[in-house]
Amino acid sequence: MFKKRISKSQFMMGLQCLKRLWLYNHRRDLMPPVGPEQQQLFDQGHAIGLLAREYFAGGVLVDADHKHIPQALKRTAELTGGGADIIYEGTFVFGNVLVRCDILKRNRDGSWDLIEAKGSTELKDEHLRDVAVQRYVLEGSGLRLRKTLLMRIDNSFIKSGPLEAGKLFALEDITKETSALLPETGRDLERFTETLASAEAPEPGIGRHCSTPYDCEFRGHCWKGIPEYSIYDIPRLSWEKKYMLKAMGILLFKNVPDSFDLSEGQKLALKVEKSGEALLDRKKLAKFLKKIKYPLYHIDFETVMPGLPLYDGTRPYQQLPFQVSLHVQAAPGAEPLHFEYLGDGLNDPRPGLISFMLEKIGPEGTLLAFNSSFEMKRIEELARDFPASGAALLALIDRFEDLMKPFLERAYVHPDCHGRFSLKKILPALIPDMTYEGLAVANGGDAQLAYYNILSGKLPPGEVERLRKDLKIYCGQDTLAMVKILEHLIEIV
Ligand code: SF4
């Protein structure tokens, strides 16, 4: 049988979906180019990998890249056969699998420890499979392994001064677990070899595996026949129920039978999807509106979540608010005043953001956010990290109301939302002349990317100014959208 060599990442693709492995090898032309968000994640992963090496400092890097594999193999053999005690990116082939190992550490008895560095804060099943296939190849190549270890980020770490790998990372011994996976690994490799030798792509059908454990790059290809507003858009519907509907030949949301087992919220969304008419519970909506006290502060944060903490006192993957937009209304229907704060991209944005909020938000009135638990949690974290302002910040939390609530609780179900209740879905449905389309920064992901680009310090000043302007337009649009949505709710009640 034709045996195509696969890499460790292709092995992981095969575990996720055989078709993904096949397409990657036979139809790479269907892959979209790497987008800026994905590139940012790659860059972050690379930075974490470099720092992880400092945990086992003094090693020798096998620097021949993926285009020079014979050289990488030769250099690795020299290093393992010679005197190197720590090797980065050691490269091995066994059977038809090629792996490159983050870190290999030689023990006194001549055995080796294999260390895989991950940016994750917890051990996941896919990490075990990832290390098991490396172990399979290393042992198959004749290397004597003593331990296999996962190096992950310790989320109890709090930055204080320069980042130290010894404090940021935690090591977990997964020797037993990877040993138990070796027979399965061999069987999987046989399956993958057979799949790759086939002239036809396997057809597992779309499903949960398209985004679990990783987002598949072939979604654009495999999902292209799925209609808009399909069963895959039904909010919070389990995959098991989606599979059931698909087996019944139902793809469109509106074709789901009334008798199908749905939650109350899903049933209401289906009713609206079928009738095309909005559902309104005036009493519920009026009850919600009654809770709003003026002056009213429409508030929205933008945040980044860096894996490697940027500022002293912060933790890995902590949500750091860098921007806030406020639209303030003195009374119902009053013209809103707009205020905003955006970090300078040079310093920790949070002290300035706290001062801004405490200065602009008066002692009375409601703070209205869309999905307010997010803003409340960030304020709670700011109070924890900046105790001098803690009491004043915590006092804000009690004043929050959530503009998502009437939609979430189905007080108002609009047919153009098609069962969804995000701000980006609700705004164009209720206020058709306001849209996020055409904005250079049009969602939270874009905003994060723009701020990371500013933080990089690599942009020319003109570009920084342009991004800052785009960020302000976007965040301002979020709170103005809330003003308009609230006006709409008041009007219909
Ligand atoms: S989109 Fe889904 S079905 Fe298609 S290759 Fe990817 S994981 Fe497999």
Image (cartoon, rainbow, N blue to C red):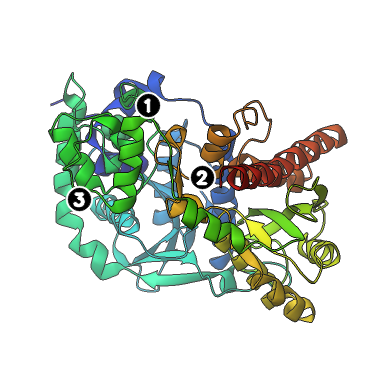
Asked which secondary structure carries label 2, the reply is loop
Tag 2–tag 1 contact (CB < 8 Å): no
Q: Quadrant of residue 201?
A: top left
Which residue matches tag 3?
Answer: 185
Asked which secondary structure carries label 3, the reply is helix
Which of 204 and 92 lies nearest the eye of the viewer? 204
Image quadrant in which the N terminus is located? top left
Q: Which one is earlier in the sequence, the residue at label 2 or at label 1?
A: 1
Name the amino acid type tagged 2: Ser
Residue 38 seen in render: no
Distance from disc 2 to disc 1, alpha carbons, whole Å, reads 17 Å
Residue 422's disc is 2
Which of 19 and 140 lies nearest the eye of the viewer? 19
Which residue matches tag 1?
Answer: 228
Front tag of 3 and 2: 2
How many marks overall? 3
